[in-house]
Structure formats: C-alpha cells, structure tokens
Image (tube, helix red, strand yellow):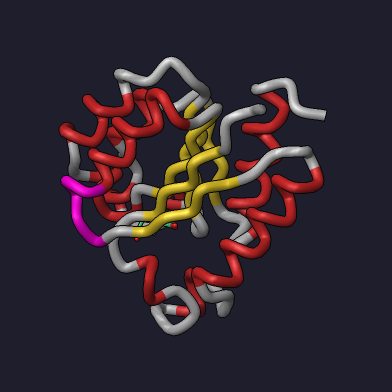
Amino acid sequence: MVKPIHVLSGPNLNLLGTREPEIYGKDTLDDVRARCEARAVARGLSVVFRQSNHEGVLIDWVQEARTEACALVINPAGYGHTSIALLDALKTLNIPVIECHLSNPAAREDFRRHTYVSLAATGIVSGFGAASYELAIEAAAGLVGAN
Ligand code: DQA
C-alpha cells in the first residue's frame, strides 16, 4: 500500500474563500481538499489534508511525514517567509517536497519574494489559485511513480 501524500496549509488559509478573494480566489479550503482528493484518487493515491495557524503544529506534521507520507505538499503561507524552524524540519525529509502557493508571491510585495521553504523544496507551484494544489498533487504523483 502506497503511503498518502500529506498536504499541509499554513496560517490564515482556513479563511480561504473569504480572505482577499481577489488574490486567493473564492474556493474554500474544503473545496481545495476535495480537488486534491479527486486528483490523488485519479492517480491511485490518497491524501492527508491538514491546516494549522500554528508554526509548531506544522512542524510536528512535517516530522510525521518523515515516516507516514510518500510526498509532502506544503503551502506554508506567511511562515514560508519567516520560519527557519519550518525549513529545518523540511530538511529532515527524504521524500519529495512540493511548495505550493495560490498566488504568485514573486509578483507581489518584496517581502514575499523569498521563502525559506524553497530551500528544501523539490519544486514549486504558484500562481494558479486552487489549481496550484492540484498541480502540486500531480507533480508529487509523478515523482513517486504513481500511475
Ligand atoms: C500564500 C502566499 C503568502 O505570501 C501568503 O502569506 C499566504 C498565502 C499563497 O498561497 O499565495 O498566506 O502562501
């Protein structure tokens, strides 16, 4: 049995759909979860989909992915720009790590142009709204050799 893809979303993404919809879109996080699940199932995989506003909780989940996931998709949200601790946790993983953003941070404010998470990412998908998550699932499935 192939392990699931773990999909982690960071702070404020629980408000997706109502939070700055002109930037992040109108899909809710539950909509994103459904899209990820459908994509994974189409590739013979499953997802564990979680969101937290708390840095330490996200780090615990990254550590859990070391043994429980075949790949990790992470939208670190604001913590991507600030958290060396999250980067350190990601660097302990021996599975593909796909960094994912709804918006394209490189085209926004200067402080969004750098993410620590990128230093530990196999690849990055950004700028496609909720579809960024689906593309990240596709990328992860390809990297783990799913059908
Ligand atoms: C985000 C981009 C980040 O800069 C921001 O802090 C977020 C969401 C995105 O998905 O576009 O919270 O990660």
The answer to which image quadrant residue 141 occupies is: top right
Q: Is residue 62 left or right of residue 146?
A: left
Q: Nearer the viewer, residue 72 or 100?
A: 72
Residue found farthest to the front: 1
Q: Quadrant of the N terminus?
A: top right
Q: Nearer the viewer, residue 124 or 66?
A: 66
Residue 145 vs 51, above or below: the answer is above
Residue 55 covered by magenta stretch: yes
Residue at horizontal 19 percent and vertical 56 percent from the top:
54
Q: Nearer the viewer, residue 19 or 88?
A: 88
Ligand 1: quadrant of the figure:
bottom left
| Image location of residue 67, percent across then percent down | 41, 24
Q: Which residues are magenta?
A: 53-57
Residue 102 covered by magenta stretch: no
| Image location of residue 66, percent across then percent down | 38, 24
Residue at horizontal 48 percent and vertical 35 percent from the top:
72
Residue at horizontal 47 percent and vertical 39 percent from the top:
99
